[in-house]
Amino acid sequence: MQTKLTELLNIKYPIIQAPMFLVSNIAMVTEAMKAGIAGCIPALNYRTLDELRVAIKALKTAKVEGGSFGFNLIVNKSNVKYKDQLEVLCDEGCDFIITSLGSPEETIKQAHAAGIKVFCDVTDLRFAKKVEQLGADAAIAVNNEAGGHRGNLSPEELTRLLDKELSIPVISAGGVGCKADIEKMLGYGAAGVSVGSPFIASVEAGVTDEYKQACVDYGAKDIIMTERISGTPCTVINTPYVQKIGTKATWIESVLNKSKTLKKWVKMIRFSIGMKATEKAAKKATYKTVWVAGPSIEHTKAIRPVQEIIQYLTA
């Protein structure tokens, strides 16, 4: 399994443990590094910059040969913490940054000056070409089987397209739940894979046992799209509560979204409300169960330690 991604990050297997809001934590990434893959945490998982600094230092201490760690940055205007988070990451140091939902130009410039690699989430060729021109070290091809905010193209179509058109490595994100899936993505031309949902049901994940068990009990057929979290379509488990509240934006949000002036503010408000609801469901047992996950939970049959999940993906 030696690929361009294993060379870039000096890891044993071409796998990134995907950054998941509220789920990813120091313990998960530490175990990921021990097992020979890269781990990533959303910077937004930390409420303060001091907490982010503490996390970086802990991961630098925990890092072992064959493992790697990074952080995910939301780089659009809805994340008012973005610039300060980027500054902390560059000051303290990490192996890589994954950018999402916006232009990575400033991140690439500052991160490269600090010796940090930058991988950029993309869902189509147009944006992939842009990030390549900006100097991204790799493109993360978010396909239509990814959990959370997903793309529109199938894993095969998007991976083959980007591999053909780009000169930088392509990392396939979405649709990986077992070793055969990894081999399939590498066969499409991917240099590696980003795997998220299978790690929700890990012992180390920072969410409730109810959330973890839901990833065991539900499967691919139970994953649906909702606009009720961030304003952008997002995949969730189709729990009774999700069925009750519906998956479409409210009528007033739909009207306001048509205004160029107000659209940004509506999305920011929806994002804030949605994130709070998701956090409540992830952190404590509640009937308001809005659990984000992707169809790769189909392969999740038990709550297991991170290292056992990685062994299942690689052995």
Image (cartoon, rainbow, N blue to C red):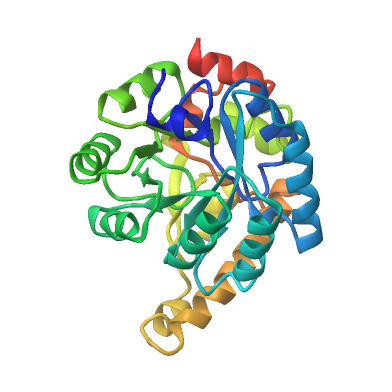
Residue lying at 26% horizontally and 46% vertically, measured from the top left? 153
**Left or right placement of residue 198 versus residue 308 in this view:** left
Position above or below: 154 against 46? above
Residue placed furthest toward the top: 315
Residue 87 relative to residue 138: left or right = right
Q: Residue at x 37, y 56 (%)?
A: 135
Residue at 65 percent across and 19 percent down: it is: 307
The reply to whether residue 208 is in sight is no
- Relative depth, front residue between 128 and 203: 128
Task: Point out residue 134 in the picture as x, y percentages from the top left corner.
Answer: 35, 61
Find residue 156 and report its image quarter.
top left
Judging depth in this view, the residue of 120 and 301 nearest the camera is 120
Q: Residue furthest bottom?
A: 261
Nearer to the camera, 57 or 240 = 57
Q: Position of residue 165 (x, y in %)?
A: 19, 45
Q: Quadrant of the N terminus?
A: top left
Percent x, y of residue 87: 65, 64
Residue 283: image location, x then y, percent: 76, 47
